[in-house]
Image (cartoon, rainbow, N blue to C red):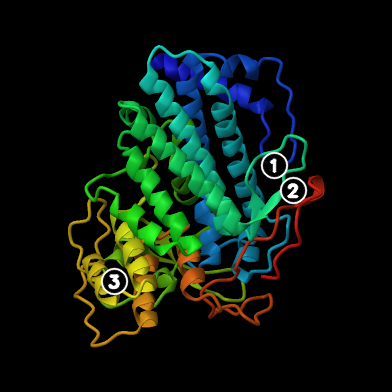
């Protein structure tokens, strides 16, 4: 493992030559390893996997929490900087730091994944399972980063272009491309014994690669309105399997949300909105899991939301963050069943989530069952959303669920968005750096 970590630093240095987003950004580092040499060396590929994973967990994960979290009324600005207040009002300029960084990070990570996919077949490995596992992981990372672009932007790129001319596709096409990559990753694992075990042992202290892929397949299919496929993918997830993004107390691998909330040097730019931004049902234990005491501070925009300290998976420097939560999988099934007209099955799944008292991550609602006499589809979906909001807090998923379940929520609304609205945007605008360099960038969505 020491050899792998040594290669990781080589790879991170070589990464400075790579395109960091769909536009062309160049850096020159005469001490860095040659990019060509890295991708021609089998011994470098474990380091590439660790490097791309660490970059995602340290950088993109934070922006997935911050930007979508403010837009979905999970967290609020507690500072006088511009970034979070812009997200909170929905009046987001192209220069907003959070959306710009998320766009850049996702394209960087996808760029590395594309390089792996493009080069690995030309490299000889002693261990076939290692080669197959790494190729599958690169396909997964390519699909995951593309999916996040499709989650948060109305149009996005499906492939990086070093010449600054990446084409933009409608989000449905973007999500279909992401789903195709996920399917490819799964097919590689199914065809190669030992490939999944290799990745599971490399990526994290606790990782179940096929289950992670199937969760993302389910998330993407749900966004596409492919409810049968979403249900099938969710049903393929082992309910006992757990996967986490791993953090340590070392400087380069600390929990990034902790570093912005509790570290002595933290700027504390945002905190949790009181009651997680929803009408919490009495006795819902998830509130105390995710939020601590009141900060005594209201948000610095005109909304003046009361705020609380963040707990959950982010109050320790080395706290691991779940890749997904088991009850999210049940909620995906519940939403898909409701959309397919199977309301009884949906209610049963909702009640499994509500009555949970032994969640392996400690996210327990501890509520009684929901027992409506004859619920409509919308009433069932209302209950699905409430549980999404309480269960999958700060995972970047609430915004998507709200947009799916309440698609007309912002019809006729202009910026600044009223404070009683549960989301402030439908999609992010396109970052300034992309707009100024890529002639193919479309017009920003109105909200």
Asked whether the residues under the numbered discs 1 and 2 touch, taking CB atoms below 8 Å apart as contact, a structural biologist would say: yes
Q: Answer left or right for 382 relative to 404.
A: left
Asked whether the residues under the numbered discs 3 and 1 touch, taking CB atoms below 8 Å apart as contact, a structural biologist would say: no
Percent across and percent down for residue 274 are 42, 71
Q: State which tag comes first along the sequence, 3 or 1.
A: 1
Q: Residue at x 58, y 17 (%)?
A: 38
Question: In which quadrant of the rendered image does the C terminus lie?
Answer: bottom right
- State how far apart marks 3 and 1 are (Cα): 40 Å
Residues 221 and 12: in front is 221
- State how far apart marks 2 and 3 are (Cα): 42 Å
Question: In which quadrant of the rendered image does the N terminus lie?
Answer: top left
User: Badge 3, how many Cα within 10 Å: few under 14, some, many 20+?
Assistant: many
Judging by the rendered image, the residue that carries numbered circle 2 is: 434
Percent across and percent down for residue 286 are 30, 64
Question: Is disc 1 placed on a helix, strand or loop?
Answer: loop
User: Badge 1, how many Cα within 10 Å: few under 14, some, many 20+?
Assistant: many
Picture disc at residue 22? 1
Percent across and percent down for residue 9 are 53, 21
| The quadrant where residue 232 appears | bottom left
Q: State which tag comes first along the sequence, 1 or 2.
A: 1
Q: Is 47 located above or below residue 372 in the figure? A: above
User: Badge 2, how many Cα within 10 Å: few under 14, some, many 20+?
Assistant: many
| The quadrant where residue 109 appears | top right
Percent across and percent down for residue 13 are 61, 22
Question: Is disc 2 placed on a helix, strand or loop?
Answer: helix
Q: Answer left or right for 39 relative to 169.
A: left
Q: Residue at x 56, y 79 (%)?
A: 408
- Does the image show residue 269? no
Judging by the rendered image, the residue that carries numbered circle 3 is: 346
Q: State which tag comes first along the sequence, 2 or 3.
A: 3
- Does the image show residue 21? yes
């Amino acid at each position: 493992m020491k050899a792998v970590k040594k290669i990781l630093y080589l790879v991170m240095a070589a990464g400075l030559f790579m395109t960091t987003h769909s536009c062309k950004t160049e850096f020159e580092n005469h001490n860095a390893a040659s990019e060509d040499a890295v991708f021609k060396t089998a011994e470098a590929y474990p380091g590439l996997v660790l490097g791309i994973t660490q970059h995602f967990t340290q950088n993109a994960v934070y922006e997935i929490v911050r930007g979508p979290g403010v837009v979905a009324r999970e967290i609020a600005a507690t500072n006088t900087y511009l970034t979070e207040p812009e997200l909170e009002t929905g009046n987001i300029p192209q220069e907003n730091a959070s959306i710009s960084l998320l766009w850049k990070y996702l394209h960087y990570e996808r760029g590395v994944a594309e390089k792996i996919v493009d080069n690995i077949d030309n490299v000889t490995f002693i261990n076939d399972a290692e080669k197959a596992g790494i190729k599958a992981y690169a396909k997964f990372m390519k699909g995951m980063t593309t999916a996040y672009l499709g989650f948060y932007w109305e149009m996005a790129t499906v492939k990086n272009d070093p010449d600054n001319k990446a084409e933009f596709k409608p989000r449905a096409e973007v999500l279909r491309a992401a789903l195709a990559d996920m399917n490819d990753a799964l097919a590689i694992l199914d065809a190669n014994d030992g490939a999944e075990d290799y990745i599971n042992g490399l990526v994290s202290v606790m990782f179940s690669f096929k289950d992670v892929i199937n969760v993302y397949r389910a998330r993407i299919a749900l966004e596409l309105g492919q409810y049968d496929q979403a249900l099938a993918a969710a049903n393929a997830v082992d309910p006992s399997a757990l996967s986490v993004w791993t953090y340590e107390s070392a400087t380069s691998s600390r929990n990034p949300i902790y570093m912005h909330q509790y570290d002595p040097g933290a700027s504390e730019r945002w905190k949790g909105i009181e009651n997680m931004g929803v009408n919490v049902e009495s006795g819902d234990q998830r509130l105390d899991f995710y939020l601590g005491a009141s900060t005594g501070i209201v948000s610095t925009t005109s909304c003046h939301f009361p705020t609380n300290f963040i707990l959950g998976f982010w109050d320790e420097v080395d706290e691991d963050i779940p890749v997904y939560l088991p009850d999210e999988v049940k909620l995906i099934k519940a939403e898909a069943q409701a959309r397919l007209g199977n309301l009884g099955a949906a209610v049963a799944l909702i009640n499994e989530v509500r009555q949970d008292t032994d969640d392996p991550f400690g996210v327990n609602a501890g509520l009684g069952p929901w027992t409506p006499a004859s619920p409509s589809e919308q009433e069932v979906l209302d209950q699905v959303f409430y549980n999404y909001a309480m269960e999958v807090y700060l995972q970047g998923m609430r915004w998507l669920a709200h947009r799916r379940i309440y698609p007309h929520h912002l019809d006729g609304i202009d910026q600044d968005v009223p404070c009683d609205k549960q989301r402030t945007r439908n999609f992010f605008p396109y970052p300034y750096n992309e707009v100024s360099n890529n002639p193919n960038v479309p017009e920003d969505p109105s909200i």
